Each structure stands twice: as C-alpha cells, then as structure tokens.
Amino acid sequence: MYDLLLRDATIVQSTGRLVADIALEDGKIAYVGGSPGGKAKEEVSAIGHFVMPGVIDGHVHFRDPGLTHKEDWSTGSRAAVRMGVTTVLDMPNTVPPTVDAKTAKAKLAIAAERSVANYGIWIGATADNAKAINKLWDDGVICGTKLFLAHTTGTLGLDDDAVHKLFLDSKGLIGVHAEDQRLLDKHHKAHAKEPRPEHNDVRPPEAAAEAVSRLVRLVRETKRRVHICHLSTANELTILEPLFGDLPITTEVTPHHLFLSVETWQGDKNLIKVNPPIRPELDRRALWTAVKRGRLNTFGSDHAPHTLEEKAADYWEAPAGMPGVETLFPLLMNAVKHGRMGLERLVEMCCEQPAAIFALEGKGRIQVGADADLILFKEGESTKLKKSELETKAGWSPFEGKEIGAPPVRVIVNGHTVARNGTLMDDLPKGQAVTYKR
Ligand code: NCD
Ligand code: ZN
Ligand code: ZN
Ligand code: ZN
C-alpha cells in the first residue's frame, strides 16, 4: 500500500511539464505515471497544482555548533522545510570550524539529532588539511571543500601559496567565496577613517572579478572542479561567459543579489551588509540576464543569520550576512509570477543542477526510486512576508513586508508531509544525511 498518492499533478522538469500521478512509499517515489493500481493511505488531488523536487540549498550557515544564538540545526532546518527547501549543505565557518574528521563528524551528529531537513556538510580548507579533506571526500562524509579566498565571517581566509597547494594536493569539489583579499585590504585601508562607508566601496566589485580571474587560471592549471558561490557582478559574468561549458566551473547566485540593490534599498544599511556586497542595479540586472540565458547553475541562499542586536552595531562592527533559506523559494516563485524566468529554469537551478553538481543520491528529480522530497505548489499567487511567521532564530528578513510568492501548499521530506501553506506540522521527523554517488 502506498503512503501517499498525488493525483493529476503537473510535474515540472527543466525539459518541460507532464501531468501524472505520483505514489510515495517508505520515503521513496514508488510510481510515476497514469493511475497506478493499488491503494494509498492518503490520496490528494493535485489538479491545478505543480509538483517539483524539494529545493536543494547548497549554501547555508546554520551556526551549529558554537554560534547557536544566531541559528541552530533545529531552527535553521525548520525555516528551510517550511518554505520548500528539503536538503541543505552547511558551511564550515562554525565554532569550532569544520576542518577535520573530528569536527565534521561532530557536526553531522548534531544535524542527525536536530535537523528536520536532509543535510550534508562542507569542510573548510586550511593551510594544511588536504589529507583530511581527501579521506573525508573518499568516505563520502563531505559534499566538498569550502575555500574562502578572502576573510569574511569566521577565521577561514587562506593566502596565495596555501590556495595553490590546496588545488594541487586535495581532491573533490571546491566551493569558493571569491573576493580578492589584496584588493579588499587596499580599499579597507582607504575607507578606514570613514565611520559609515558604503560596503560596496570597502569590498568593491573589482575584488570579486579579480578573484574569479584567478580561479580561472587555477582551474586551467589544475583541472580541479570549482563551484563559485554568490556571483554578484556583471564583470564576473563577463569573465566566465566565454568559458561556459569548457572549464569545470559551476556557479551559484543568491536571492539577495537578485532582488536587492544599493539604489533601491531603503532600510538600515547594516541589515544588507553581506559579503560579497549587495551591488548596484546594473549588476543585479546582469545576474537576471544570466539566469534567463542559462548561464548560472544554481540558486543558493547563503543563509547567514545574525541577530538584530549584532546588526545594530556601527558599520565596521556589524557582521556581514543575512538570513535567506526561508525566502529563497517564495522570492523565486514571485519572480516566476512576474515573468523573470520560467518554472523550468527554477527547477533546473533549485533541484536538478545542485543534485548533479554535488552528486546527491536520489535527489533533484521526480522518478521511481528517488527520495520522496517534493513540493506541491500553485503558481501566480503572492503574499507579503510577515516577520512573525519566520522560523529562523535570527527573527528578521530584509524582505519583510515585501511581496513574495505564496508558500508551498505542501512540503514533503522523505515521504512525510512537513508543512502546509507555510505552517509546519506538529511532529516533524528527523532529516537524513545525504549520500553521494561519485
Ligand atoms: C557569511 C557568514 O556570515 O557566515 N557572511 C556573508 O556575508 N555571506 C560568510 C560568507 O559566506 O561569506
Ligand atoms: Zn561567502
Ligand atoms: Zn574603495
Ligand atoms: Zn556563505
């Protein structure tokens, strides 16, 4: 007997849509097609609804262990699944940082205990942990290595020699925060006496472009596979455009760089202080053009929660980053509503490409045998984001009061319905660690 049968659902894939029934059993997709024989414990008519795989967010900072006043695996994952993100990959700049077998396993144990989303982790690159990285990669413990080319939140910045050595000595996917530390230092110094400089002047667009150029050279030399996080400028796109598909480089873009700009932000500037910075409209539009043309691979939230008290400090003291895992899907749905992209692109960049880039077993596609991580949703409905509805411990969003797409009608994780219309169910089953096929 099936656990759940979704009848007449319009399944969205990057290649198009089809109407079919989907049956779930024991946490897996058991059937996709015309009416299946056999009964189900629960049957839902999905007429007029779309179904897509759960969103895979390859870039969250759930702050656990060590910074749990900002977020923890419970609150972060609840925020995620409420709005359709069913799998998250957590970044290593926790306390202690995730940089070896001990800290990786400790973090996975916390996630196993607290996460209601499916989860994986990145390991942070240090000057001398290539050996540990390689073992964790071979053992399928990590989704990849996170390299901070510049100092941002945490202590994981790396100098040139160490970066080169990492590219030569380690294996697996390298995810990169790409800003050039030398250019950052120069501009930091130039603005150091100003009490409230523009963040975009202190961490200028050239720093991102310079770091991307350097990555291209490193990839040419070493043939390593690189995933560049949070592209934010037109110039990065210009550098990467002629290389698209030729080098093993994939990219991520965040909602905050797609929906916010320095010209249009009206609130407290510290709230949108983030690395790399929110850019001018020109860059924002270039990012959307790239999304439209299929030149960017993934959406990732860079969910980087800090408390409002921390954000209330002066410019220099206020931490960079903002919550985003809970607004990723509804913001993108609103963009679909307004014709900025089609549902096919959304599914490609939220599900199919992340599953392929991170080699996630059973994720990213609706097919028999895949994990039953699904979103049932309507298109064309919007609502206003209310602070009181947020599950993130940070308790705020730069998109408060803004129009967002309606929450998913139903979010299903491992076959269990975990949220309906933006409301979490009472008893949420634990998420599972992702596995990698590589
Ligand atoms: C991130 C954080 O706070 O952990 N901050 C940010 O501004 N994006 C770190 C990072 O991803 O750079
Ligand atoms: Zn970053
Ligand atoms: Zn400057
Ligand atoms: Zn980040």
Image: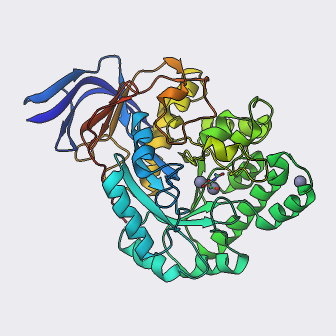
Q: Residue at x 89, y 62 (%)?
A: 189
Q: Position of residue 317 (x, y in %)?
A: 75, 53
**Side (left or right) of 438 relative to 23:** right
Q: Residue at x 87, y 63 (%)?
A: 186
- Where residue 337 sits, quadrant-wise, is top right
Q: Is residue 109 visible?
A: yes
In what quadrant of the picture does the C terminus appear?
A: bottom left
| Foreground pick, 239 / 156 | 156
**Side (left or right) of 39 relative to 52:** left
| Foreground pick, 135 / 72 | 72
Q: Position of residue 40 (x, y in %)?
A: 11, 29
Q: Position of residue 395 (x, y in %)?
A: 54, 37
**Side (left or right) of 408 relative to 113:** right
Image position of 153 with respect to 29: above or below: below
How many marks the image carries: the answer is: 0
Q: Residue at x 61, y 60 (%)?
A: 246
Image position of 48 with respect to 136: above or below: above
In what quadrant of the picture does the N terminus appear?
A: top left
Q: Position of residue 425 (x, y in %)?
A: 30, 32
| Foreground pick, 229 / 106 | 106
Image position of 355 with respect to 365: above or below: below
Q: Is residue 434 visible?
A: no
